[in-house]
Amino acid sequence: MRYAPPGLCVNDFALLRDEDGTYTVLHLQGPWTAEFDHLRMETSYGRATSADLVHWQPQGTAFGNGLPGRFDQQAVWTMHPFRHGGGMAMFYTGVSGLTADGWPLQAVGLAYSDRTDGTGWRRHGTGPVVEADPRWYRTGERMGWRDPFVVRDDEGEGWVMAVCASDVSLPVEVSGCVALATSPDLEHWTVHPPLVSPGDVDELECPVLERLDDGSWLLLGSIGATRGFDAWTAPRLRGPWTRRGSLGPTGSYAPRVIAAPDGSRVVLHTTPRQVGLTDAGDRCRGMLAQPKSLVVREDSAPRLEWWTGLNAWLGEETDRPALHAVGDIGITGPVEITLRTDTPDDGASAFSVGCDGKNLWVTGPGGIRLGETVLTEPAATLRILTIGEYVEVYADNVFALTALCYSGHSAPWTAVTEEHSRTIPVRPIRLPDPHRDDASAVWPGP
C-alpha cells in the first residue's frame, strides 16, 4: 500500500513493466536521519517488484555511483529507464562534486542493459551524454541539469529529452524550467531553449512526458516550493504548452505514469515522513504511495481519482476503530470528521478532516491545521483514506489533500455537523506487509 525498502527512505523513482506483467520500481534510497545529506547518502538505486502496484517486494540495489574522477562519482540521482531494442536504456543524473559555494554539479549520463527487469546496467562511456548549455541554462552556481525523461520524437525518427534546469534569463528564485534536448540515436544530443519556463517556479523537478490517446501530450512537473506537482498539456511535444494547474496536492511529489494491470493509466508518487515519527519531527524523504487513476478529458483539466484497484485491499464495513481505513461521507454543509482521539476512551479530537464546501482541511491536536486546500467546485462527497500517520482526502472522487499526523488513538469515525453527530462506517485496509518491523514499516499508532 506504501513502500520503502527495509530501514531506508525512498525519494524519486521510475517504473517499468515487463512482458509477463511484473512491475519494477527503481528508486533513490538513503538512510533515516535527521540531517540528510543527499550528496553522500543517495548513492544507489534500490529495486523492488510487484504484480499489482500495491504489494512491493524489495530486490536489493541495482545501480550505484561511478568510479572516482567520473561525472557521477559523488551521487546518482533521478533516472528514466525504458525499453530499447531487446533490452533497456536508462538516462540518469550524475553529480561530480560541489561548486565553491557548495552547489551540486549535475549532468546526464546513459546506461544500457540486455535485460528488461531493471538490472544488469553498464555505463555508456565514462562521461555524460548531455550537459547544460550556458546560452539558455545556468551552469555552475545554482545550476540544474537533472531528472531526465526521454520519449520518441513525434516529429521525426529521433528522441526528445526533458530535463529539470534553471533558466538563465530569469532571476534564480523563479528560474525553474523544463529544458529540451534532441537526439537521433540516444548518444549524441543537441540542447535547445526551454520546453516550459513558467517564470514563477523555483524548481521544476521530475518532469514526465506522457502521450495521450488522441496524440496530444501531458507534462507533469514537481514544484519545489509547494512540494506538489502541476500539469501542462500540448497538441505536440514542442508545444504550445498550456498550464492546467495543480494535479497533486502538497505532500505528493515526483510522479510517474504507468499502465495498471487493467490497462488504465495510473500515477504513483512519493510521500514524505517526519523524523522520529512525531508531529514535531522535520519532514524527510519517505515512501512510495499507492496509485491514483489519471483522468484526462478534452473539456477539463487532468485530475487524479480513486483507483479501483485498491478496492481488493478493503475489508467489510464496520463502526469499529481502525488505524488503516477508508470511509465515505456525503456533505451538504460544514462538517468535521474525527478520525482519532486524544485518549482511547473517546476524548477530544486529535486528528480530523473538515470541509465547508469549498475549503478542505486536516487538523491535528489542538486544532492545528496540518494541511488545507481550496476546491475548484463545492464538494458533495468526501472519501478519506488513512494508513498509519498518512491521510488522503478525495473530494467528489478527485485527489485533493494529503497530510501527516502521528497523534491520537484509533476511534470510530465521527462526523459533526451543525445539526447532529453520527458515526461513519469505514472499510479497514489490509496491509501487504503488516508484520514489518523496521524504520520503513507503517506507523503502528501510539
Image: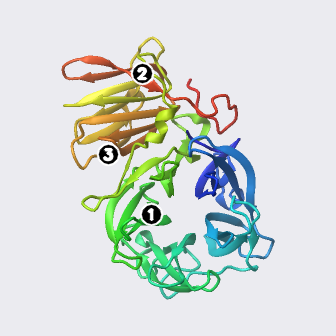
The residue at which mark 1 appears reads as 221
Q: Would you say 406 lies left or right of 129 here?
A: left
Q: In the picture shown, does residue 358 fall above or below 150?
A: above
The image quadrant that residue 145 belongs to is bottom right
Amino acid carrying label 2: it is Glu
Q: Residue 317 — which label? A: 2
Q: Whole-Å distance between the Cαs marked 2 and 1?
A: 37 Å
Q: Would you say 301 lies left or right of 21 here?
A: left
| Disc 2 element | loop
Q: Nearer the viewer, residue 308 or 349?
A: 308
Badge 1 density bin: few <14, some 14–19, many ≥20, Cα 10 Å: many
| Disc 1 element | strand
Q: Earlier in the sequence, mark 1 or mark 3?
A: 1
The residue at which mark 3 appears reads as 373
Amino acid carrying label 1: it is Gly
What residue is at 48 percent from the left and 29 percent from the top?
314
Q: Nearer the viewer, residue 9 or 319?
A: 319
Viewer-nearest of discs 2 and 1:
2
Viewer-nearest of discs 1 and 3:
1
Where is the C terminus found, in terms of image quarters? top right
Task: Tell me residue 102's x, y (percent).
Answer: 63, 69
